[in-house]
Amino acid sequence: MAGFILRRLGVLILTLFIASVVIFALLEIIPGDPALTMLGINATPETIAALRNELGLNANALPRYLAWISGMLHGDFGLSYTYRTPVAELLAERMMVTLPLAIYALIFTVLIALPFGFLAGAREGRWHDRIILFFSQIGIALPNFWFALMLIMIFAIQLGWVSAGGFSGWHHGWINGIAELTLPAIALAIPQATILLRVMRSALIETARQDYIRTARAKGLSRDQALWRHGWINALIPVVTIMGMQFSFLIAGAIIIENVFSLPGLGRLMVQAIGQRDIILIETIILMMVLIVVTVTFITDLVYAIIDPRLRRPTS
Amino acid sequence: MARVILSVLGFLQLQSIIMAIIIVAAVNATLPVSVFADTRTDAIIGLQLEPPHLDPTSAAAGAIDQVLYANVYEGLTRFTENGDIIPQLAASWDISDNGLLYHFTLHHGVIFHDGTPLDAAAVKFSLDRARSDASTNAQKALYAGIANITINAPDQLTIELHQPDGNFLFKLAWGDAVIIAPHNVDQLRQSAIGTGAFKVKSWIKGDRIILEKNPDYWGKPAQLSAVTFRFISDPVAALAAVQTGEIDAFPVFPAPENLAMLASDNRLALINGSTEGETILAINNARPPFDQRDVRRAIAMAINKQDIIDGAMFGYGTAIGSHFAPHHPDYIDLTNTPGYDPDMARQLLADAGVSDLHLTISLPPPVYARRGGEIIMAQLNQIGITVTLEPVEWAQWLEQVFRNRDYDLTIVSHTEPFDIGIYARADYYFQYDNPAFQSIMAELDQATDPAKRTVLLHQAQRHIADDQVNVFLFQLANAGIAKAELSGLWQHAPTQAMDMTGVYWKN
């Protein structure tokens, strides 16, 4: 197990390193001067030069890359060009919206997908299955920004139960925070839940055909009992795989939902940073997202290994 | 990467437009009643962009001025709603006969938000800082004419200019020339310590800035006890926020197509005024064949301005014929020089020996450019010009079009007040190098006699219209929406400001 974890960690670090090079290189290539973007069309060339100097933009790419990486290794993420506050502070603030939102949405996803997926799989071809499949078909077809707007129209504009967007922060109490994130979390979760539900269903159907389920049935268990005791845990491997991918999607997909609900999350910060060519901020946000994604993949790998001991052995 | 980002941004915008249509169709005339009826002393104002920081003297970001100008920070002079220049921190001034010396007397009893008094030293410090070598003031050029600032008494100072400047008091009214507290200079971006009727109370980054009334204000106190600026970038989210009533006003509303529908609700009132934004189809005057006046003129004659105002801005905007705001007292109407005449345009192109013309229009993100570009493309097709539309982000526009001048045509709104002087800058991105115009502007800069200035300004407007430097499309409207009970909001926007000092609830 230790060897397995070490190998996975190595892959994680290598991925991060490659990602950092690619992100830095891409941002070097795209047009747009941060100083010009900040000062606008009336600024004199001397003023722009003064600002470029202040921001340290006149140095060559390699020293800037090394400074960025070594800064991060020391826990110093640098100073945002436009906001002029430490990048770490900006990220921490925004992460407090995006991460809870993604986790909240994942909880919704799992709470919807697993029970309904199990029910549909266990009752394959019967009316339960058909109704669930019908709704999941609609769910998959829903673009989440559209669904988000429908939720706003119904619950904010028509019924007036919740506000149409915005996030007043966690200092008003976590209940208030959770309440403000509920609609966005549902909007993010529903399309994902319907996908996961289908994965759960087909995995369970696949499992139901395995020999050990037949053996269990032969020993006198009913189909439901066999699936409940031996089936669902074995059906989880594909479900966990997809969940891992979905969590990454929930973080990245939040860009759109954060816009629709005006949430001060990482996605909106990134869109603003790109518009303002706040290069150090963009680089760090993207690297942070890569870190989240590879960490989730790492955890997913670990969970496999727990569910399926065969995966702990190195591949030949 | 750039393309991916662009397509993501484009996708977001397209979504917004589609959803705006759906949302309007679905919820028209079903606003909840409860949220509109209450007596309040605060106001919640929607803004599309959030200030990146709180220092108006080191960035061009209009959002900083929108929140802080007149509310938190004040200058020696200021703009009024109609664009007039009135005294603010300066109680009075007199100008020497040669126009070089401005003697200012400051108001008594002005204190900064942290309790320290405002004096002539703070004024000198602020203006010296704006014009210093290390200055990162976005409008530094405006203050380059200052030769020297001397303090005569704690409440008196003299500003000496290199040469007479008929516009000097106007330049002092800009948000970039506000007076800051010298001891706060190192924290300017994080903490705004001004002299205004409101103080910054809190800032929830990404969501809102809350201002509270300054009880120790030296002038006429604000009527509202607090103002919250909420930042909502998505047009559909902005619409939803207005419809739920959680926003009291959205003075620059990002979705003009919905304004008529919103205004049909009698609890809401339309804001429809003028801005300083001359929206132009800018032409690269140095690039053949656009270096020929007749080719530029042909393009101008192929364009029906009203179609663009109606189609892109849903009727909000006033057609213009030169680079000058219609509400300015010295404005002359050149809208129909030349008028819309596609036949004549075709003829001009043929006479100039230009056939099979292909050109590219670079379109920055605002709706006037993206939608306006499509209409202009159709209109230019009518006279046989093939058009490629190239959407660009602002940062890309600034580098590629503005700095490197690598473009054919572009659509952009020049929002700086009184900026006809840019046509005298030969290296400006239009690349219009005309000595006759440059001498008009040089004369104007030194003219202080109002009658002479009027004559020169008429000449200047006519000159660039006759040369058809660009196609002058329309003056950008200040179009927004507010609750009908909320009074005192600016109807016009002579500068990017949301002056809340005179805003109150009628009941």
Image (cartoon, rainbow, N blue to C red):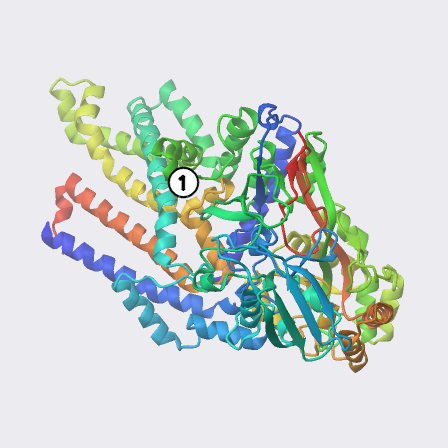
| Circle 1 SS class | loop
Name the image quarter holding residue A223: top left
Q: Which residue in the structure is indicated by mark 1?
A: A169
Foreground of the two, B324 or A279: B324
User: Residue at image x 49%, y 25%?
Assistant: A161
Q: Is residue B338 left or right of residue B174?
A: right
Foreground of the two, B119 or A276: B119
Can you name the residue that lies furthest to the bottom here? B435
Q: Is residue A282 left or right of residue A5?
A: right
Inspect this view and state whether residue A28 appears: yes
User: Residue at image x 46%, y 55%?
Assistant: B191
Foreground of the two, A84 or B134: B134
Q: Is residue A197 positioned above or below B382 on the image?
A: above
Q: Pointer 1: residues within 10 angstroms few (<14), some, or many (20+)?
A: some
Task: Give, as a three-letter code, the residue at label 1.
Answer: Gly
Q: Is residue B35 left or right of residue B447?
A: left
User: Residue at image x 78%, y 75%?
Assistant: B97
Q: Quadrant of the C terminus of chain B?
A: top right
The spot of residue A148 in percent (x, y) is: 49, 35
User: Residue at image x 35%, y 64%?
Assistant: A78
Inspect this view and state whether residue B396 appears: no
The spot of residue A251 in percent (x, y) is: 37, 46
Q: Is residue A214 left or right of residue B161?
A: left
